[in-house]
Image (cartoon, helix red, strand yellow):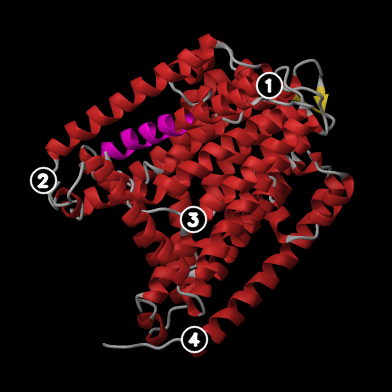
Amino acid sequence: MLTAFQKYRQAFLVGLQGNLVYRWNFALRGFFSLFHLVVVFILWGAAYEGQATIGGFDLAQTMTYFVVLLLMQFFIGAFNEDYQISEEIRNGLINQFLLKPVNYFLYRFSIFLAARLVSGLLILIPVAVAYPFLHEYLSFPDEWWRLGVGLPAMLLAAVIQFSIAYCFGLLTFWFLEIQGFVILSLAVESVLGGQLFPLDLMPEWVFRVAQYLPFYYQMYFPVAIFTGRIDQTLAVQGLGIQLGWVLLLLLFNHFLWTRGLRRHTAVGG
Amino acid sequence: MLHHLKIWLASARYSVTRTLMFRFDFFLWASVELVWMGVNLLLISVIYGHTDSIAGWSKYEMMLLVGTAMLIQRLLFGFFWSSLFETARNIRTGHFDFFLAQPGNVMFMATTRKLDLDSLVNTFVAAGVVIYAANQLGLSPGLADLALYLLMIGCGLLIHYSALVLTVSLAFWITNAQGLEGSYFTLFEFSRIPRQAFKGAANILFVWALPAVIVSNIPAHTLLHGFDPGHALWLLGATVAWFTLACTVFHRGLRRYSSASS
């Protein structure tokens, strides 16, 4: 157990070093994300003109949702892990993992955690710079249970994010190019994951159906807990469903990996 | 001019042949873009489910604005995006040498080489959104209004092209910052918001300093409220200014280019 931990700890440290090399790319991405936040503020600010609430939430609550969403995207969102996995399969770099006692999923997940640690800490810089403009729009609930439920929800959301990216990466066993599938899926994830607008603004029945889909749990769920958009009962229930999706996705990943390897041809030394 | 048109037609023929070879890719990417356009319309639909107006624009006025922005974006993607995206990469890797040896203006050759038919197909969908919104608003523009609208769409396209050339030209100076051109997507988002929603510093920066807002707002305004000479001159002036700036910066950067070591 300890040996296994040491193994993936090393992968995490290598990932940390690798991602620190690209710190400027992450910083640049963080800077441009602030522009997205400006778009959100202008659009929703204009929508709130002449009315105090939309969907039962005031302007500050909605803006807080989008700020936390941005932070969450950099702390737990999958960036280009699908492409990295795809490249490793296509170029035969996964061959080395077939001969070593290293679990490819855990190896990639360790690197994913390292990457998100770097990007997550880097997004804090532009957000801190923008804080004097943001702070009057921030409104957090003062219930401490949200932290207790929100943190595990955030961790499980990270696993779902990575698992979905991993699934798409593994599609390379069957398809040469996965970019189209990834961007198509991104559209679905953006809508049903609440990344475009808070999901609770959708018609009631859509919101209910979304609660049984994995996308709901990969971003909207932890953000909604932290920003007070869902109550305790819904949060605890959701945590159970989220755990179920994590297990299902892990099983599906394993299934794709074993089936994919049957098609894989390792050439050369 | 005719010489460049012949080169462009040859490139277009090559792009069509290539698309016919990879038909699945064509359908996949056309669907991807279609879904994303649907996502943008969904956002409007959801917001207008809770409010009647955004900065004084009704739902269908907003749809007309978003349709206009999508139309310009699809044209940009169809005619220039692939070539521009590759240009930045080619500058970094040294493959840009290939364009220096070609029989035409370097900027033209490098930025117009590939057509994306999947994006061009979706211009019809974007145009459909504009027509649907105009219908819902009871608009009946004359031929002159339509010609003016299309001319303004052309100006908007040229402004976006120029801004992207400027972004890509940064690769001549900053070789280790990848994905700069991808970040340009963020600026597109501003073109889907009514100009009246921008206030204070945001108004100065995004309406007056950067052309992000006027490229779509002025054509949409023309279709909604008729010809405004002030607006037309503003858009034309911005087009000339941004295109001149793009040409200057690109050719300045070109002087710095020193093949693979650049």
Q: Position of residue B221 (x, y in %)?
A: 63, 20
Secondary structure found at label 2: loop
Chain of the residue that carries numbered disc 2 in the rendered image: B
- Looking at the magenta stretch, what is its main secondary structure? helix
- The alpha-carbon separation of the residues under discs 2 and 3 comes to 33 Å
Residue linked to disc 1: B224
User: Badge 2: few (under 14), some or many (20 or more) residues near its Cα, within 10 Å?
Assistant: few
Residue linked to disc 3: B117
Residue linked to disc 2: B258
Residue linked to disc 4: A261
Locate the C terminus of chain A by quadrant.
Answer: bottom left
Do badges 3 and 1 share one subunit? yes
Mark 3 belongs to which amino acid?
Leu
- The alpha-carbon separation of the residues under discs 2 and 1 comes to 50 Å
Q: Position of residue B2 (x, y in %)?
A: 27, 42
- Res. B238 visible in picture: yes
Q: Position of residue B97 (x, y in %)?
A: 15, 52
Q: Magenta stretch containing residue A250, yes or no?
A: no
- The alpha-carbon separation of the residues under discs 3 and 1 comes to 30 Å
User: Badge 4: few (under 14), some or many (20 or more) residues near its Cα, within 10 Å?
Assistant: some
- What residue range appears in magenta? B156-170
For residue A146, the mark is none
Mark 2 belongs to which amino acid?
Ser
